[in-house]
Amino acid sequence: MMKILQALFFPPEQPGGVSSMVPYINQKFQAMGWDMELFSLPKRIRGKGTEHHEFATFDWTQYSGRPVVDKYMQTLRDYLWFARMRLRNASYDLIHAHHPIAALVMRRLFPDTPVLMTVHSSYERELVLNGRIEDQGPEHRFLTSLYRELEHQTNMIITVSHSFKSYIAQYVDRPEDIRVIMNGFDPNRFKPVENVNDVPQIVTLCRLVPAKGLDVLLQALSIVKKRGHAFVLHLIGDGPIRKELEEMAIRLGIYDETIFYGYMLHPEELMPFFDLFVLPSRAEAFGNVFAEAALCRLALVGTDVGGIAEQIESGVNGLLVPVDDVHALADAIEKMLTDGEFRLRMAHAAYERAKEKSSIARVIGDLEEVYLSYRASYI
């Protein structure tokens, strides 16, 4: 059987997203008899790398001197420094990277080994939405140039939604070659329960950054409260705008209805006891948390954007609203809170769809097909 390296950026013990999904993939393949291991950059490794790095498709030095670019390049050097030391005597039949830095470093260290790259999210869009870089500015151009570099340096680009494939297409030469494999989750992690609370319990789970649209959520809930509806909002996660959100909740008169949990290691253990999951993101490549909430059998309300719209069919297994539309979000939440039969129907439909479409078994099958297509390279 093939020997495969799954190259992460964040350590696998990090909660959420890629860092929680890939270890499950690794375990499933190992249980099937595959020789597979994980690699990531420890959080303590900072400022160690000194090797010069050049890209094949663009000159990154034209963007140097800007904090985002300089930090990105230093992180690449750090990853290269650690990987060169840690993987000095290693050999693999295939490498599957889950971050651009991991893919570029692995190509440099293993030039004769097939390297696949799954692009899970758009760092540049997150930075723009969070107000850290300017749209179409130099940092944005640097980060979007990496897509063509990845196309040049890897054997295959995979991404997690058709929407995100369309986004990447504008930055590469052969968009038709991009493969879409939507994320999947181990259903054993989730323990849905039949649960209806006297006061509807709303939950959202994300990093507290502007890109997640939590300001829109709080404004919408203030409208819902003014319409006379009771609720409790459970806001799980932490981030740089937590204090701003707390102050906003006070100003809008919904602080008493809002619980700020901060960081939580295993939120899926708590989520089944809520009634409704809401996250009005301004952008999502896939939106793992919607699939996870669905597997907890929660009703879903999200924005009609990116991978969210590929998981929710509005009125069938949840509700979709336009990005930044406070009143539409308030109306959707009100519908879910006041029509218990509709909410339960949406929750069960979301659960059934997630079991079918977001199964880890489906992901394993898709990846196995891709991996085996490279067997000829080492037979």
Image (spheres, rainbow, N blue to C red):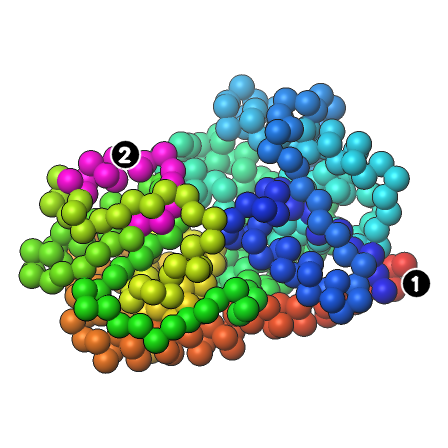
The residue range painted magenta reads 235-250
- Find residue 333 and report its horizontal and vertical position in percent: 21, 64
> Which residue carries the number 1 mark?
379
- Find residue 173 and report its horizontal and vertical position in percent: 63, 51
Viewport quadrant of the C terminus: bottom right
Closer to the camera, 61 or 278?
Answer: 278
Q: Residue at x 48, y 40 (%)?
A: 124
Q: Which mark is residue 243?
A: 2
Residue 365 seen from this side? yes
Outermost residue toward the right in this view: 379
- Find residue 28 and report its horizontal and vertical position in percent: 68, 65
- Find residue 356 and report its horizontal and vertical position in percent: 51, 77
Q: Earlier in the sequence, mark 1 or mark 2?
A: 2
Q: Residues within 10 Å of mark 1 (few under 14, many from 20)?
A: few
Q: Residue at x 24, y 68 (%)?
A: 197
Residue 318 seen from this side? no
Magenta region includes residue 238: yes
Q: Residues within 10 Å of mark 2 (few under 14, many from 20)?
A: few
Are the residues tagged 1 and 2 within 8 Å (C-beta)?
A: no
What secondary structure is marked by label 2? helix
Q: Horizontally, is 248 left or right of 192 in the view?
A: left
Q: Residue at x 39, y 59 (%)?
A: 270
Q: Amino acid at mark 1?
A: Ile
Compared to residue 156, the image places residue 188 above or below, namely below
Magenta region includes residue 304: no
What secondary structure is marked by label 1? loop
Q: CA distance from mark 1 to mark 2?
A: 57 Å
Compared to residue 233, the image places residue 198 above or below, namely below
Q: Residue at x 33, y 54 (%)?
A: 204
Q: Which mark is residue 172?
A: none
